[in-house]
Amino acid sequence: MFIAAIETSGTRGGVALADGDELLGEESFEEGMVHGRALVPALDRILRKAGIAPKELGLVAVDVGPGSYTGVRVGVAAARMLALAVGCPVAPVVSLDVLAENAEDLEDFVCPVLDARWEQVYAAAYRRDWVWLRTDGPAAYRPEELAARLAPGTTVFGSGVDKYPEVFARFPKGPASWGVPKAEIVARLGWQAFQTGATDECNILRPLYLRPTEAEVKFGVVETPRPPAC
């Protein structure tokens, strides 16, 4: 089954095409928030290169966040439109799950940490049991609260660790490359979701924001969000 994968949660997005668990093509965007203008042409190029028509797609996998609000909206909107046009289901994939897969050589505990601004981070904790199993999150935390929740020896990485190095100084730190989500992994996790029946219809697909947007807070739609207590 052909899978189109969309990754737009970070500053550098991308798309991928897979046949089940076999990667057929992948294209990354330029650095910066260019997702809106880069996504459709990139997807068209990898489909044409593989000789596959959009109507042949059986699944659209998309990173639903957390991450850049604008980027996630672009990716989710594109996934909904493509799935509607093709008539296939969509597989929502959590960005932190995507990042955890970058740490493929670790055998114990890992926690990708994203800078969420407002003195918060987005994070989820995982332990290895053949595959990465999520044990906490995804959620928005104050950095100190997250550090207190993590098992000793947990490897941390991502923009949130770079933003608050003193808070996470006692934990092993993964390389910067692990903090970049990949469309190839979105395709793989989307395929796994499809196999277990964890897919959505396009009309119910929603971004995973974890907290209100800045505009909602600024204009009094909601109160300033608070992360979960320890």
Image: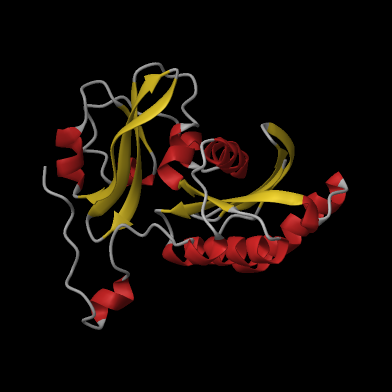
Quadrant (top left/top right/bottom left/bottom right) for the N terminus: top right
Vertical placement of residue 19 versus 5, above or below: above
Left or right: residue 200 versus residue 150 is: right
Query: Residue at 31% across / 43% down in the picture?
Result: 123
Viewer-side residue, 82 vs 220: 82
Left or right: residue 129 versus residue 142 is: right
Left or right: residue 125 versus residue 150 is: right
Query: Residue at 32% across / 55% down in the picture?
Result: 116
Residue 69 in which image quadrant: bottom left
Vertical placement of residue 86 versus 46, above or below: below
Quadrant (top left/top right/bottom left/bottom right) for the C terminus: top left
Viewer-side residue, 153 vs 89: 89
Q: Position of residue 63 (x, y in %)?
A: 51, 51
Vertical placement of residue 205 versus 62, above or below: below
Residue 175 in which image quadrant: top left
Q: Position of residue 87 (x, y in %)?
A: 68, 60
Q: How is the image coloured?
A: secondary structure
